[in-house]
Image (cartoon, rainbow, N blue to C red):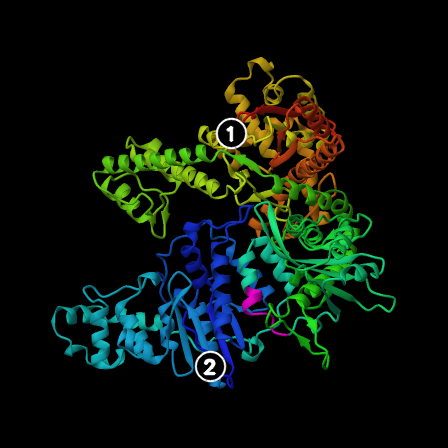
Amino acid sequence: MPKKEPTPTRPCLLLLDGHSLAYRAFYALKEANLMTTEGQHTEAVYGFTSMLINVLRDEKPTHVVVCFDRSEPTFRHEAYEHYKANRQETPEDFRGQVSLIFEVLDALRIPYLSLAGYEADDLIATLAHRASGQGMNVLIVTGDRDALQLVDDRVTLLMTRRGISDMTRFDPAAVVEKYGLTPRQYPDFAALRGDPSDNLPSIPSVGEKTATKWIQEFGSLTELVDRVDEVKGKVGDKLREHLGQVIHNRQLTELRRDVPLEADVEALKMGQWDRDEIHKLFDTLQFRVLRDRLYQSIGTAEPEAEEGFDVEVVTLGPGQVEAWLAAMPQGRAGLAVKGSYGGGTGRLDGLAVAAPADAEGHPRAAYIDLTGLTPADEGALGRWLADESAPKALHDAKGPLLALWAQGFDMRGLTCDTALAAYLAMPGQRSFPLDDLVLRYLHRELRAEADTGGQAALFDDPEENAGQELAVRAQAVQELADALEAHLEPRGGARLMREVELPLVRVLAELERAGIAADHAYFTGLEAEFGAAVKQAVEEAHRVVGEQFNLGSPKQLQEILFVKLGLPKTKKIKTGYTTDADALATLATQTDNELPTILLRHRDQTKLRVTVEGLIKEVADDGRIHTTYNQIIAATGRLSSEKPNLQNIPIRTAEGRRIRQGFVVGQGYESLLTADYSQIELRIMAHLSGDEALIAAFESGHDFHQATASRVFGIPPEQVGGELRARIKAMNYGLAYGLSDFGLSGQLNIPVAEARALKNEYFEEFGGVRDYLESLVAQARHDGYTETILGRRRYLPDLTSDNRQRREMAERMALNAPIQGSAADIIKVAMLHVQRALEDGELRSRMLLQVHDELVFEVAPGELETLRELVVSQMCAAYELRVPLDVSVGVGRTWQDAGH
């Protein structure tokens, strides 16, 4: 978007057309199918918010307001009953998103207006007229060309062209250049042209060129009407024939500048938005990137904090570290590490320690230059870092721990990880940058205070100020740790952090450092095989169609499928008809044409080739793949992995199993061992609900899904066939995820009414489950959060939302958070127990991976039986449920061979 700074001495009012921009954002991002992990579509609100941030950043208005249409008829509908009668029904995925935009505007303290009987355009015209009359500049952002009539020397228009990021700036000269007309002439032109979007009729045989020519020749519509007999030819006859219609159009295209708005322009001044509200809302919407961009490019209207950190910083060189550490007061120290880490290792470049405050309360910190340290210094630093009795606080400690290991240091005595503590306090948030937490909890900025006049000194050159900057971070971590622990204690999260999450940091670092061996040659061959399958699918598609085309181009696919081959039209989208996987699958079953099936195979093989290609790139010099575990991402407490994402490798497909075949036992070890919990979430459901029938199904000795199907349908277990078992299996797992009647019908491909009846039959047999699920939502609505068996909370403010879609999603989260979260708690406790037992038993065997409910181990020679017994006993003892935990174990040379 072209940047143009407003005149510094003149205030600028930014006016945005809410519905116009929301719809454009929705359709621009529709193919991206944006939604939260809970299923809330966010295309419109994401696109609108992104555009808003860009405009606020680039234009720097002093005043702002967003105007919206109303659902009630306007004065134009009263004047013309067919006005906008051709508008399509609001897309289902769009519903509810305007109210989310309202929430974004509320959080940003940006006012929004609407008025019954008028359109947003009329409100914009009125406010633009008032503001320019008071000497202000005005900037209008819309996708509606009717706003061109408002442009003048003080009113500028930003018109969206494609999507919501590509805009054209119109001042009076630009309007003339683009349309050959002045802004005042534009509504005359629009009346002659007609407007299909508003259902305003056009004159037959009269297009935009002719309409423009007439207005240029006669100067205005009024003059054209007065001299209409001068227009010659058939078009003149058409004009005279439809003259009444044109005059009527002109009355409707004129924007009202006298709407009775009570809002005073001065009241629309940009206000100070609330950081906490932005966090909560953007966390819910999962707008991490937008939030970061908002903070970086705009900031709040007023300074968020006046103070930084007034800390005495010293740089310790050779011969100074040992004495400084020895003189450090008792208490918890803050640590900050400079370096890089990833792929199971790291590099340590610098270290800062913030000592506990001295007797006078003065904070002291030291930056330790690691180059040229004496052996005595290194020894003193190593002993202090590894001292379990010397408490320490660090931010996002796993990476720094890997960097310390790479330098030959160990670190113990970690009593607070401020990123982990913030995650437990705010589990819905997706990132926890230190500067943001310091501002939120300490009301300070992550900067040093200069010596002169108490003015804050920001770091202009991080390289020159690296030591001071790192020391300030260490001091901030030390103080933040106390604030976060005080915040967590009454919420029950302090114990969870202390007993589970903090100890797990070290275990995850060990897993990352170990990695898992990869058969590079096998993966290379597999990539070539999948690549050949992709190529074959392309050739088959070209053969079927009889011409070459790009299988990855939705536009070309639409032309081939629906025009050339004449296949049934799929769901209508902005760019034509969808060619997504569901649509292709439907076409494959509805038609005899083989192209949809080929296209699906092409996509599957392409995805597999890309997956294997990504794995090959991640093989380190040691021949192993070192994934990175994320401990502070999932609100339920689940671990995730990246670079590569090993949890994303398909396990139930033949191709996915072939990929697992490439993960192998490493040199010096004899096999891999896998151990995973059997039906852990269903066991947790039975435990939490206390449903005796469900518990009895587990205790029956029969296959669990077979046993529950037997009870629901009233037949012996041995008579339960595959279809009945599949139905009950979908029910068993679905209930733990808040499965709706509609969702169940989709899974089983049965009518919604049949799915509802099946659910009712299930609850007749397992009434305790029904009562438990109902109580979960009611209790969460009362408390504002759910809890797992270890007290992990998930806050759900949307349970009382006026937005039905948001409220229903929160209800589904209330159903599944305690069960999923409890499963996450148990696997974490199991990892801690197993790792401790491995160390206590001095085994060489080691844990390599955690994937969902599965742990993967590398077995040292002669330790298989000992390891098998240790793993099973420790995993089963992780938590005592009414239905005991059950662990399945497999052994093999590869990850796939060790499956079970």
* Quarter of the figure with the C terminus: top right
**Marks 1 and 2, how far apart in space?**
61 Å
Seen in the image, is 262 located left or right of residue 779? Answer: left
> Which numbered mark, 1 or 2, is in the foreground of this view?
2
Which percent across, then down, holds residue 856? 61, 32
* Disc number for residue 667: none
Q: Position of residue 828 (x, y in %)?
A: 69, 38
Residue 391: percent from the left, percent from the top? 80, 52
Q: Earlier in the sequence, mark 1 or mark 2?
A: 2
- In the displayed structure, 384 sits above or below 584; it is below
Q: Tag 2's secondary structure?
A: strand
- Quarter assignment of residue 102: bottom right
Task: Rate crowding at label 2 as few (under 14), some (14 to 19) or many (20 or more) other CA atoms within 10 Å.
Answer: many
Looking at the rendering, in which quadrant would you find the N terminus?
Answer: bottom left
SS at circle 1: helix
Q: Provide the residue span drawn in magenta.
A: 294-302
Picture residue at 70% right of the left edge, 76% below the top: 450
Name the image quarter holding residue 473.
bottom right
For the question of whether residue 226 can be seen, the reply is no
Magenta stretch encompasses residue 750: no
Q: Position of residue 332 (x, y in %)?
A: 80, 56
Direction left: furthest residue: 233
Q: Please name the residue that numbered disc 1 is placed on.
A: 754
Q: Which of 538 and 92 lies nearest the eye of the viewer? A: 538
Which residue type carries mark 2?
Asn
Looking at the picture, tell me which residue is in the foreground, 18 or 562.
Answer: 562
- In the rendered image, residue 299 lying in the magenta stretch gets the answer yes
The numbered disc on residue 137 is 2
Q: Report whether residue 32 is seen.
A: yes
The residue type indicated by label 1 comes to Glu
Q: Residue at x 35, y 71 (%)?
A: 253
Residue lying at 34% horizontally and 52% vertically, measured from the top left? 575
